[in-house]
Image (cartoon, rainbow, N blue to C red):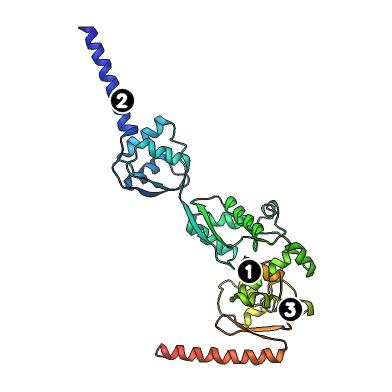
Amino acid sequence: MFRKIIKYSIVLAVFALVFAAYIVFFKPHANAGVTVVIPKGASIQRIASILYQADVIENPNLFRLAAKLSGYETKLQAGKFKLPQRLNNLDVLRLLNTGRQIEESVTLPEGSTAKQIAAVLSAKVEIDSAAFMELVFDSAFTAQKNVPASNLEGYLFPETYRMYWGIAPEEAAGILVEQFFHQLPKDAEEKAAALGYTLHEMITLASIIEGEAILPEEHAIIAGVYYNRLRKGIRLQADPTIQYIIPDGPRRLLNKDLQIDSPYNTYKYAGLPPGPIKNPGHAAIVAALNPADVPYLYFVAKGDGSHVFSATLNQHLRAKKEFDKVRRRVAREKKKGNGN
């Protein structure tokens, strides 16, 4: 009799353990598939709370127990995860441990500054924008990436990327620089040298072209104008270089802006600025390497994305006068339309 009691007790204990293991580890939760974000440095308590609020798990305490017993308690990854429906605690722990995250589509527009790129990365994949900017201006990191400059401005290629949420700033910067060199024409240094410039100077010019050109057919023409001015020692007087140094740009420039004492002020100083003012796209880089052979020294925006190009100052002043007329007329019509 006593042996039977012991036998039944063992069976009941085993059954209880199996049932407990099922409840803790294997019981699926009947929920819909959801996307969750696990912050960096989140404790197991915080993770359990996030999952419970998202209806991924049924009981936070049992989830924490499962994490402790399975050894996953300190091995869960931060990130953005898509979790399918009807997962048990062990399934969830395994998914969060592997770090298989959702990839986000991140578009960096051509002509973005490093600061603007940092803001996009922060918004899309929650990168640490301050840490990213520190890397951009870290000369040692820049040299490590074989960039011929003291910082990465101009070498962060604008493109659409697939990135994981919470990507490290070092990895993100590395991806952008790698894409820059992938897109850079293989004969870029030779072509730049043939024009009398270094690769860094050519990228600097490409960044200014990016800031001026809107229509694809005008990239090479604008490049030709700038090369003509550089050869003749005429100041570039490029508005994008002023936009780069004013703290509240981009906006309409004022006369006082043109007097700012900065090596990037191409109204005040001849030649190229010390480095790129934007991160140019492929078309601007190609234009800087292959400028059109044109007689022009000047151009003025028409307001529709195109420009009027002139070979002489008198022609340029006439074109500018016509544009000023158009701008004043548009301003009057806008004011009239607002009922003022």
3 and 1 marks in contact (CB < 8 Å): no
Q: Earlier in the sequence, mark 2 or mark 1?
A: 2
Which residue in the structure is indicated by mark 2? Answer: 18
Q: Mark 3 falls on what kind of element?
A: loop
Which residue in the structure is indicated by mark 3? Answer: 293
At 54% from the left and 63% from the top, the residue drawn is 108
Q: Is residue 169 left or right of residue 61?
A: right
Locate residue 268: give its quadrant. bottom right
Seen in the picture, residue 178 relative to 279 is either above or below; the reply is above
Residue toward you, 111 or 51: 111
Which residue in the structure is indicated by mark 1? Answer: 283
Q: Callout 1, which amino acid?
A: Ala
Quadrant of the image containing the C terminus:
bottom left
Q: Residues within 10 Å of mark 3 (few under 14, many from 20)?
A: few
Locate residue 294: give its quadrant. bottom right
Q: Earlier in the sequence, mark 3 or mark 1?
A: 1
Disc number lying in front (2 or 1): 1
2 and 1 marks in contact (CB < 8 Å): no
Residue toward you, 63 or 265: 63
Quadrant of the image containing the N terminus:
top left
Q: Is residue 107 left or right of residue 242?
A: left
Q: Position of residue 285 (x, y in %)?
A: 67, 67
Q: Position of residue 243 (x, y in %)?
A: 61, 74
Q: Earlier in the sequence, mark 2 or mark 3?
A: 2
Q: Callout 2, which amino acid?
A: Val
Q: Callout 3, which amino acid?
A: Asp
Q: Mark 2 falls on what kind of element?
A: helix
Seen in the picture, residue 41 relative to 27 is either above or below; the reply is below
Residue toward you, 224 or 299: 224
